[in-house]
Image (cartoon, coloured by chain):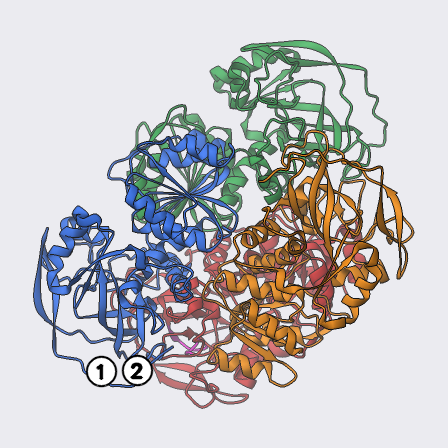
Chain colours: A blue, B green, C red, D orange
């Protein structure tokens, strides 16, 4: 852990992007928040845009705050960020002022059945500020701002050598890694099919490769598949030109794959996933199709397939992701295609949404 | 273990129901088979009819033998039976002649990835006799006969006091119990929704109740729901008259259930299952819908739901089921509605298929 | 959940036994505490004496409060109790005033690695009140008093029909059940050796029996072994007259047992445990020998034995224990041999320690 | 998989080192064995000496064959080897003649409780050839010969580029990896203490490092510690000059380590292991002390420590080790200090035993 000795001077107010209504986010001046017990104040170094930010912006989902949508409540969006500890709350000694940290999104309430089982991303008091749940950018204030308060459970020290920009991808990598965890964790030598080369899919490629899997990446856009190859995919299947089932059959000599990470949300992806996996195999569902999908339940039962829905980054996987990043075993850097200033957030959001200039990850810097 | 001292005289030939073609099963005289290494000969005491028998009879599924359907190969059907060890193969000392046993269906090849992981019901050499896989009644000869050869892995001693008829339900109970195992095994105090009061569903009620769950049973027919109550369901939801979601809401005070066993195969059951379970809950899929079903994948991901397809009775759960039956904690007896002679198998099959006289389990006795 | 409608009038002060120094506990008048956020106030209905109470009384262990022993800090001892919710803290809606509850001891800090994994009994901030850890009777005020504040995570509703006295055993049963959980949870049909017929051992017998295990109980005192038989032990080995290894050999036909719960703390018990269990078996260590013991590490490695130390009742096992008690599948009642008034705590402690009148569980009632 | 097209001509007889009595191994001419069902014939390319070979040579342990020691039964020793498939048994299509393979030691009987659970290294029929158990070099013929028969479950294809010498370390790496598996498998970012820089310890360093752990290696000899650093240990503690507890304290800022692999068999190692690990941590016991050791059972219980004895390389970890080796993530090459011809086995054994020339791994080549 590397600590800066210089005291950090915290201003009274800060710039922050607040959600006034659907598709209505405005840069305002807000008081810099103060960390309470078990909390720290992070001075944001960089914040990345995630597809879910666009969902929050437009529909208020997936979070709701004490049962209501986040519009018009002064809510600051943005959940993938990194920065420096600027202040700590009472009795916090887990990190020190000056420490550079990556963040994860969710801190559970600590009092529901799931939190007590360690499944804090499935907190049954999701969105209840009163009961202590936090999901920064979703149900508590997030990172498109100069400062954010984080629960102590959601910060992970990063080395000096890791740029904040790259560290914004810790939670993306943590989600991918958590997916591999729920698939059993023993991925060395396994064949892993990743469907969907979005950021989570690409980090699933990187993590799977780092831990020894033979990764097959399926997607539509050639540039993304190329990026996937650079991150460690041994095989890339362009699903518009190639038949995914035929390619899986060919690559695995008819055996099927051991594991699947479904990260595309495409309507047919789950069907392809459960048919690509071998008997007794496992599928992680990390994306949200907009509509109900057709599902071959008989095939799943007859072949003893297990299917794991995951909501984000659980089981402290962000910490494991940071470790792999710090060791150079995975890197988020290749995903970062655009850097803008915090003030240009609307441009950044549009760049991300429309994938202008083949945008993968767009990062804003205060 | 209770052993009969009287030597068992094994005849040269036996009566057996052989599958000649789709819906064409005939009573023939066959040589009594001889057990090889790691095998035993079971003199059948009783054999029950399962819905899957009707699938095998009509479509040859779910098994295939070395890649081909079982028709016209001298295949004996029937997979739920119990009886007495009549002879043992070379080097078999795990059981002795005279022991009374229940059976399970599957013995894996012992050499594929799944068998080596202990997942023998998901054997990757399923149906390959040459590689050592057995699934009596599916891919190797079954129990609608006077004798059957069983792999040593598929027999479980039962006490003298347990009638063979009841012991035919060991594999049914074992399937239900395996379902509870994959759901995590810790069911005491949990709310368990069982959908579908067929034999597996009813045994899931009995097993769940025995292990301390609060069981909700959902089904259509009042007689079955009544039977479910007798087996331990605290709540029974008649889904034609009542809304299952509303009842789950009411019974669980809005929390949703912890666990679901989907044993109906109904087209909407999986949808109802994933919406009945609370965030972070688990669903076991133990039935095979005939068509692809609509599946709310986004809900499953967003709520971190895990879904476990199971093929039959894995992980030696039949042994645990026999133990619970022997201790009187669960009983199969209430399910047995009809007893016929082996010679009357066609009548028995029709009784089971058409549920004549409210048939639940129909048993034939040689 | 059964709620009493009568409002509960809470007095200003209460009687409580406070630990002034080693072996120096005094009945004093203290203000009735007020529940804070995520807390409730319990009006004690009954409190039982545990062997660990004597440790706390004499040595201050196993707890320490913010790094110091609990002597002279106004600390109220007693951790096995049950009662009625008298008041709830802000935003507590999980239980209502008037609910009858059993308690568990530990609520973790919610912010350390272990708590975030769900292992709250292994909280790395054990004893740190500032960081939110509670272990009533050990590091926060306990139950030898008229009232106690409990974290919401440590109360479990009990049915009206369950006497408070019996409910004091929920945490004992929960510890035993947690032991079975870490041993894999699938105990039906397994042979389970319980060493040591103290309260935890006896409840391990009851829980193992309820879940379908074949239980062997080993101990010294005939009365305790008799009690163990009444609670479900199929075999009882009087280790002063019989050789435990020889008896295990005989009962298991030379196979060894599947699982062991070591609840005695006897110097040779662990050695006997690892030699009684079959290859690949599992041993739970739930007792604390006073000295280091000789351990056959080579045998443990060569036979792939797993050994699980447990500290108390983790993974919400108390909830499962309460469910089994409420269903009549286990009962703590046979263990309760003595009932005294709260004012007679010193007599109660002496009765428990010296096992006067064959004391098993001694309960005090305010 | 790379297959050689040239047919392999198999001679009638071969050179093999046979165990005549304690410390009496002789080079003899034996018929080349023929593979039966589920077996292959391996033409040995290289075979390494393991400490256990010396145990077998001297004491016949750890294996026994059908209950008797292996002396005077024509038994061929040696269990760490690699080579080329020279012939396959009936119905074997999992590998083809010409394939280059690494081996693992154990194939279970496939019919006992443990094998059916996937725990084949803990086979309850260990040493029973009749029931199908194999442990080459221990209870079935091994690899200090020109040819050996292997069960199909014990061969893993290796790439052309991997020298046989290095591939002999697959089983060593597989044992280390299996240790990490039983410790939970999620080692990225965890602190891992490896005690004992023998071959298994050194491969535990390499595997832990490859999967992202921060590895601390403890040992006595500077050369070994240096080798450990080269394989990925971030910290090396010379236990004769430094206090291991003090160093662990210093390195982990007082937190203790997350995981321990005890690979030394030193009398005090287990004590140090359980005190080095933090509360709720896990220890794998992969070495066999010659005498019973003192064990702080109370500390283990009070701190909820789990201890996993492992016998060798289970759960197909050798396959995962081969994958990591093939990907260059771990390498066995640095351990190979000596190469001799098969005929010089006695010299090789002496070199290994006396660590002549700082021997780590001594390999013989036919």
Residue B9 or residue C10, whichever sits in front = B9
CA distance separating discs 1 and 2: 9 Å
Q: Main secondary structure of the magenta part?
A: loop
Residue drawn 42% across and 55% down? C159
Q: Chain of mark 2?
A: A
The part of the chain drawn in magenta is C140-149
Residue drawn 38% across and 79% down? C129
| Label 1 vs label 2, nearer the camera | 2
Any magenta on residue A63? no
Please, what secondary structure does the residue beneath circle 1 have? loop
Pointers 1 and 2 in contact (CB under 8 A)? Answer: yes
Q: Residue D101: name its quadrant.
A: top right
- Note whether residue B226 is visible: no
* Residue D364 rendering spot, x and y as whole percentages: 76, 56
Residue C25 in the image: above or below residue D358: below
- Note whether residue A171 is visible: yes
Q: Which residue is mark 1?
A: A8
Residue drawn 76% across and 20% down? B33
Q: Which residue is mark 2?
A: A4
* Residue D33 rendering spot, x and y as whole percentages: 81, 39
- Left or right, C279 with respect to D127, comes to left
Residue B264 or residue D183, whichever sits in front = D183
* Residue B318 rendering spot, x and y as whole percentages: 61, 38
Graded by Cα atoms within 10 Å as few (under 14), some (14 to 19) or many (20 or more), the crowding at tag 2 reads few
Q: Chain of mark 1?
A: A
Location of the N terminus of chain A (image quadrant): bottom left
* Residue A265 rendering spot, x and y as whole percentages: 29, 41
């Amino acid at each position: 852990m590397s600590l800066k000795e210089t005291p950090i001077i915290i201003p009274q107010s800060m710039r922050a992007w607040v959600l006034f209504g659907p598709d209505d986010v405005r840069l305002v001046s807000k008081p810099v928040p103060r960390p309470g017990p078990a909390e720290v104040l992070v001075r944001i170094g960089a914040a990345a845009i995630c597809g879910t930010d666009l969902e929050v912006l437009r529909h208020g989902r997936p979070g709701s705050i004490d049962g209501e949508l986040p519009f018009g409540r002064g809510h600051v969006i943005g959940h993938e960020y990194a920065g420096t500890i600027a202040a700590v709350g009472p009795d916090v000694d887990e990190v020190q002022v000056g420490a550079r940290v990556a963040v994860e999104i969710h801190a559970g309430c600590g009092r529901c059945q799931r939190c007590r089982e360690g499944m804090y991303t499935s907190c049954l008091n999701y969105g209840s500020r009163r009961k202590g749940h936090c999901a920064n950018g979703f149900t508590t204030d997030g990172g498109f701002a100069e400062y954010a308060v984080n629960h102590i459970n959601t910060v992970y020290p990063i080395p000096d050598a890791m740029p904040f920009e790259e560290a914004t991808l810790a939670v993306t990598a943590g989600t991918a890694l958590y997916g591999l965890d729920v698939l059993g964790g023993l991925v060395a030598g396994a064949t892993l099919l990743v469907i969907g080369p979005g950021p989570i899919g690409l980090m699933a490629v990187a993590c799977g490769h780092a831990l020894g899997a033979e990764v097959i990446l399926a997607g539509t856009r050639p540039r993304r598949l190329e990026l996937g190859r650079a991150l460690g995919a041994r095989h890339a299947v362009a699903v518009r030109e190639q038949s995914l089932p035929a390619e899986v059959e060919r690559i695995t000599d008819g055996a099927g794959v051991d594991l699947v990470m479904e990260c595309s949300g495409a309507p047919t992806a789950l069907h392809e996933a459960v048919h690509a996996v071998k008997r007794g195999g496992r599928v992680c569902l990390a994306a949200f199709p907009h509509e109900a999908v057709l599902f071959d339940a008989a095939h799943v039962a007859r072949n003893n397939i297990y299917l794991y829905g995951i909501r984000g980054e659980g089981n402290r996987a962000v910490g494991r992701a940071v470790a792999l990043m710090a060791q150079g075993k995975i890197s988020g850097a290749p995903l970062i295609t655009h850097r803008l200033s915090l003030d240009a957030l609307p441009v950044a959001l549009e760049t991300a949404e429309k994938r202008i200039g083949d945008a993968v990850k767009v990062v804003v810097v205060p």
